[in-house]
Image (tube, grey):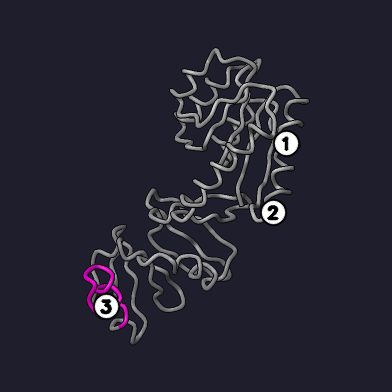
Amino acid sequence: MYLIALCDDETAELNKTEEMLNGYKKRHPQIELFIECFEDADELLYMVREENYMPDLMLMDIYMPEKLGIEVAKELRDMGNNSIIVFLTTSREHALQAFGVDAAQYLVKPVSEERLFPVLDKFFASAAEERKKYLVLRVNGRIQRVAVSDIIYCEAQGKNQCLYLEDGTQCLLRMTMTEIYEMLSAYQEFVRVGVAFILNMDHIDNLNAKDICLSTGKKIYLPRGAYKTLKEQYFQYYCGEE
């Protein structure tokens, strides 16, 4: 699923852009899109800042009454948001400034399908490659992208599973351990340990017959008979040894 945020203070323009995106969805049914509309830039900023809202793509008007889209984009970048931004505007006046906030495209209104769809084609082609490095998960009722490299380990917690990330974040998931491992098994650094853990071998500091010590200091005791298989997987990953 891809999250797309539309931000424009003019309702008619907002509806027009949403309609074009829905048209794109019909032409590309294999691409799952979820569109959210914002008529107030401050509402968008609030969602990103307070609700960890992280759309994959933002289509944003530059001329809005409360603040320019360029200013909104700068605030987003200052918050660490790296969403792809495409500006929609009636003037080319701020085109050079758009590059200063790492905008991907600058389209002058009126925007047509003929001009917008190639931009979307380029975005989704690039995003498909980039997504190989991310998991798209539902965390606390919201869709969230998690970088695979940020995952230290996953631990079963009753009917839920918890992902522990490098920055200390804990993501509680209403998925089975098997479902999560199916997502992570495409990445050679992940290994399953017993029924309760999935580990990123890049974060193993120490491994012996009794336990594993992770880079966070977390100690995981090995199930009976697990050491030999895990040791083989560990050395194969790092040294190509069987």
Q: Which amino acid type corresponds to the residue marked 3 in the rendered image?
A: Lys
Mark 1 burial class by Cα count in 10 Å: few <14, some 14-19, many 20+: some
Determine the image quadrant of residue 18: top right
Rendering coords of residue 145 (x, y %) = 52, 50
Q: Is residue 74 above or below residue 20?
A: above
* Numbered range of the magenta stretch: 229-242
Q: Gap between marks 1 and 2, in whole Å? A: 16 Å
Circle 1: element type = helix
- 232 magenta-colored: yes
Determine the residue positioned at 60% across, 20% down: 62
- Disc number lying in front (2 or 3): 2
Determine the image quadrant of residue 58: top right
Determine the residue positioned at 58% across, 66% down: 175
Give the residue pinned by disc 1: 18
Rendering coords of residue 36 (x, y %) = 68, 39
User: Which residue is at the front of the view, 163 or 17?
Assistant: 17
Q: Which amino acid type corresponds to the residue marked 2 in the rendered image?
A: Pro
Circle 2: element type = loop
Circle 3: element type = helix
Determine the residue positioned at 54% across, 54% down: 136
Give the residue pinned by disc 3: 231
User: Which residue is at the front of the view, 200 or 7?
Assistant: 7
Contact, mark 3 vs mark 1 (Cβ under 8 Å):
no
Give the residue pinned by disc 2: 29
Mark 2 burial class by Cα count in 10 Å: few <14, some 14-19, many 20+: few
- Disc number lying in front (1 or 2): 2
- For marks 2 and 3 on the same chain, the one whose residue lies earlier in the sequence: 2
